[in-house]
Image (spheres, grey):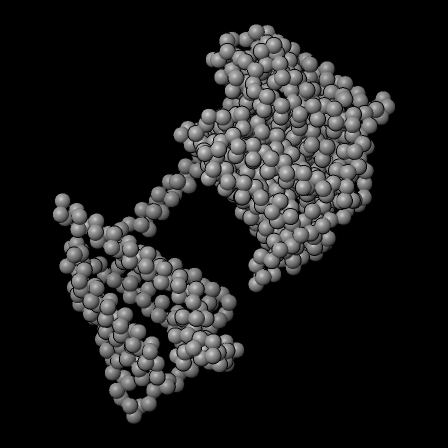
């Protein structure tokens, strides 16, 4: 199982390393590899029944009791098959689409990483793992959307997608942590069986989980990143919209539906946000002329439809949402590949420049017609059944059903109109302006995948017995929380649902016939308003950039003393605030000191340190300040000698000596500086020093109240010689027991030394020039 889920990462590495030497071979190897994964997962088909599940655990972080767990139930199996089967078809399409592209190896690697991350997400058996794969989908989609990184639009769109979805990912992480705190478990199976009704974090969990889902699935007001992501190559758009990325948010809602559906606000929020997104995005889709942007807004609208259906929460509504998820994947994957063929073979995506292409691109036309048929929801397509179930769910919803029904009717009518525009207008309608390239048929590997997807969406409604028994029923049982069956019959008699469907077709045909007038009427929706979410996003980004510039100028001002002052001020505020907020002040201050008054020489280092402190604040010379500071260090080293810590004292003496020597060597190389004559600044430095010293003193007094007996002390004392082969316990701790810490410190020092040498060499080179 581990190889099957994470095999995509291995294939990505192979593509990155060997594609340029064997482009065709590695391309087909990727297709075969993903198809093999799909075949492996098909072996679980029929073995997962109702609410049953299987887990595959591998040790991951034993100290935190976190395992790498792959959780397989009906819902995850459905998404796995969707991802792997669509991945196989889209990778086959990619072999033809990316032919001759010098960066094809990078593209294949990114696509495989994207697919593997999505597989890991839907099979995550613990919430830490789920979040990691969630963010990996965001990162890999960023790489894919910005694939054409020589284009400013692609770079900006990739950044936008990453910022929006990663921001939602942080909210999701917080929500998942609150869930784990409430349930006291990271395990997904245990969490899904838990009761959160008594959790004090209930409303926070609701808001955070919804933010994560809404940003990923492009719900209003986070919808704008998805149409802009069309800067990506067509295979990315097809995969992202049909089976991955945006469906991750829907998967999250479906996965947590049994757990969160009883929380106040869950149903209402999903229904209202989903309904508004559904209509708003459908209208925006209608006023576009770029076929990829048309399809992108249709995706946003369809996602809103699924969210609204999940919000209704009834059995019939969840069945409608789930069916439409499959329907949308089939027709949208096909239509995006059709759009890619149109762009690839005619040189344009503008529908005004495309017309009567059926004879020139027959297979692409067949795919477009079948996919449009499914999108419009005409029988016998599975889209017809999903649409009718959605109408039925809205009509019988306990509250706000009229909102969802009205929204779904409006959106569905627009879908019908757009389906006519794509399926009929482009291939059989009026002859349009001449496209940049003379249209010609696409190669077989570019028309076969959309044909298979569209054909499946059209005819699966007829051959639906095996579909509902082995795939849909187990998945729906997991969502609903009990064993259930979905009814996929076309005819349920003459009722209001059928009337709504017929009226939808009539209105949709009217939308197609009067599309030019309606576009002018709806043109206001596509304008950039000051309060539009995307406008606010860019405005917020500009403000954040300006704020970071001000902060950088303030903090990174080139004065080392300001850096140190800022660091210590923050430390005093943070540590001091925590110290007093938690009431850590000692109840009794021990005034007796382990000093023998008959040994007056113990006061000599204290006197030297006090003299050094005074001289640091009154000196104007760098050399005097350096020597005064060294008096403090040597005084502390002397104290260690008196209290039987010679090894620590030797280290301190060595560090102080080397520091003084190094600073004296570079003093003459430093530029002239302005003396600190400001009494106000000098006074602030004195106050900060006193506060920091007082705070450290209080912390040390607290440490004195802690019992010195420790299991670690006994362990180190008894095990240093037999295991570390050394009698100096401190040395053994540093070299053996905490070897990785020491290695890290040495590495940091080594990197610093390299930097110093590089800067010194650069300075010497400049002087010679």
Location of residue 509 with respect to 121 vertically, above or below:
above
Image quadrant in which you'd find residue 676: bottom left
Is residue 100 rendered to the left or right of residue 368? left
Is residue 561 rendered to the left or right of residue 489? left
Q: Is residue 292 something one can see in this rendering?
A: yes
Is residue 163 rendered to the left or right of residue 510? left
**x then y, percent, for residue 375:** 68, 23
Quarter containing the C terminus: top left
Location of residue 22 with respect to 617 vertically, above or below:
above
Location of residue 439 with respect to 148 vertically, above or below:
above
Q: Residue reaching furthest top?
A: 431
Q: Is residue 282 something one can see in this rendering?
A: no
Q: Residue reaching furthest right?
A: 493
Image quadrant in which you'd find residue 116: top right
Q: Residue at x 23, y 73 (%)?
A: 631
**x then y, percent, for residue 661:** 20, 67
Location of residue 465 with respect to 372 vertically, above or below:
below
**x then y, percent, for residue 136:** 53, 44
| The one of 359 and 503 positioned closer to us in this rendering | 359
Image quadrant in which you'd find residue 514: top right
Q: Residue reaching furthest bottom?
A: 598
Q: Residue at x 36, y 67 (%)?
A: 692
Q: Residue at x 39, y 85 (%)?
A: 592
Q: Residue at x 28, y 85 (%)?
A: 602
């Amino acid at each position: 199982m581990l190889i099957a889920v994470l095999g995509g990462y291995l294939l990505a590495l192979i593509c990155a390393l060997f594609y340029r030497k064997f482009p065709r071979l590695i391309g087909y190897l990727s297709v075969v590899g993903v198809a093999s994964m799909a075949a492996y997962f098909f072996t679980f088909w029929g073995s997962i029944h109702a609410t049953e599940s299987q887990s595959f655990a591998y040790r991951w972080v034993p100290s935190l009791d976190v395992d790498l767990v792959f959780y397989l139930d009906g819902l995850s199996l459905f998404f796995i098959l969707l991802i792997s089967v669509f991945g196989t078809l889209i990778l086959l399409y990619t072999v033809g689409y990316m032919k001759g592209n010098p960066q094809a190896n990078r593209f294949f690697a990114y696509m495989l990483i994207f697919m593997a991350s999505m597989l890991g997400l839907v099979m995550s058996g613990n919430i830490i793992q789920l979040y990691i794969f969630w963010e990996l989908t965001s990162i890999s989609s960023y790489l894919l959307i910005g694939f054409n990184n020589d284009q400013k639009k692609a770079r900006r769109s990739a950044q936008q997608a990453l910022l929006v979805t990663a921001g939602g990912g942080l909210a999701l992480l917080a929500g998942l942590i609150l869930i784990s705190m409430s349930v006291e478990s990271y395990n997904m199976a245990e969490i899904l069986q838990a009761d959160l009704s008594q959790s004090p974090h209930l409303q926070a969990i609701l808001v955070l989980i919804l933010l994560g889902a809404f940003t990923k699935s492009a719900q209003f007001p986070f919808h704008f990143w998805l149409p802009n992501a069309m800067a990506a190559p067509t295979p990315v758009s097809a995969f992202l919209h049909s089976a991955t990325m945006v469906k991750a948010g829907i998967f999250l809602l479906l996965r947590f539906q049994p757990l969160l559906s009883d929380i106040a606000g869950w149903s209402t929020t999903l229904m209202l946000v989903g309904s508004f997104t559904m209509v708003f995005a459908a209208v925006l889709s209608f006023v576009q002329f770029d076929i990829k942007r048309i399809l992108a807004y249709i995706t946003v609208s369809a996602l809103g439809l699924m969210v609204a259906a999940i919000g209704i929460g009834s059995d019939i509504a969840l069945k409608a949402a789930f069916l439409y998820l499959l329907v949308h994947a089939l027709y949208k994957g096909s239509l995006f590949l059709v759009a890619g063929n149109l762009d690839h073979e005619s040189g344009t995506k503008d529908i005004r420049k495309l017309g009567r292409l059926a004879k020139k691109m027959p297979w692409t036309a067949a795919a477009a017609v079948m996919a449009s048929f499914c999108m419009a929801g005409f029988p016998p397509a599975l889209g017809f059944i999903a649409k009718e179930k959605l109408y039925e769910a809205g009509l019988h919803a306990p509250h706000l059903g009229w909102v969802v029904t009205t929204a779904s009717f409006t959106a569905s009518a627009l879908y019908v109109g757009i389906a006519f525009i794509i399926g009929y207008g482009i291939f059989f309608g009026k002859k349009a302006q001449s496209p940049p390239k003379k249209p010609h048929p696409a190669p077989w590997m570019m028309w076969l995948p959309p044909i298979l997807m569209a054909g499946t969406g059209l005819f699966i409604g007829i051959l639906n017995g095996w579909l509902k028994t082995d795939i849909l029923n187990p998945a729906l049982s997991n969502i609903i929380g009990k064993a259930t069956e979905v009814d996929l019959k076309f005819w349920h008699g003459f009722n209001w649902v059928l009337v709504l469907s017929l009226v939808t077709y009539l209105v949709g045909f009217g939308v197609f016939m009067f599309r030019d007038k309606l576009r002018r009427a709806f043109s206001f929706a596509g304008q950039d308003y000051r309060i539009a979410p995307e406008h606010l996003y860019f405005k917020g980004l500009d403000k954040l950039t300006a704020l970071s510039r001000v902060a950088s100028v303030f903090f990174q001002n080139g004065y080392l003393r300001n850096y140190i002052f800022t660091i210590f001020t923050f430390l005093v505020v943070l540590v001091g605030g925590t110290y007093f907020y938690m009431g850590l002040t000692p109840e009794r201050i021990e005034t007796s000191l382990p000093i023998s008054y008959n040994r007056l020489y113990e006061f000599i280092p204290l006197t030297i340190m006090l003299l050094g402190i005074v001289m640091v604040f009154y000196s104007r010379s760098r050399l005097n300040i350096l020597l005064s500071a060294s008096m403090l260090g040597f005084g502390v080293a002397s104290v260690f000698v008196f209290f039987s810590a010679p090894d620590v004292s030797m280290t301190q003496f060595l560090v102080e000596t080397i520091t003084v020597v190094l600073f004296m060597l570079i003093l003459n190389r430093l530029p002239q500086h302005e003396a600190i004559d400001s009494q106000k600044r000098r006074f602030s430095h004195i106050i900060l020093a006193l506060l920091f010293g007082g705070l450290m003193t209080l912390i040390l007094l607290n440490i004195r109240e802690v019992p010195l007996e420790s299991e670690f002390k006994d362990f180190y004392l008894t095990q240093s010689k037999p295991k570390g082969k050394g009698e100096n316990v401190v040395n053994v701790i540093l070299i053996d027991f905490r070897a990785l810490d020491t290695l890290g410190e040495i590495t940091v020092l080594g990197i610093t030394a390299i930097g110093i040498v590089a800067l010194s060499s650069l300075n010497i080179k400049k002087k010679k020039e």
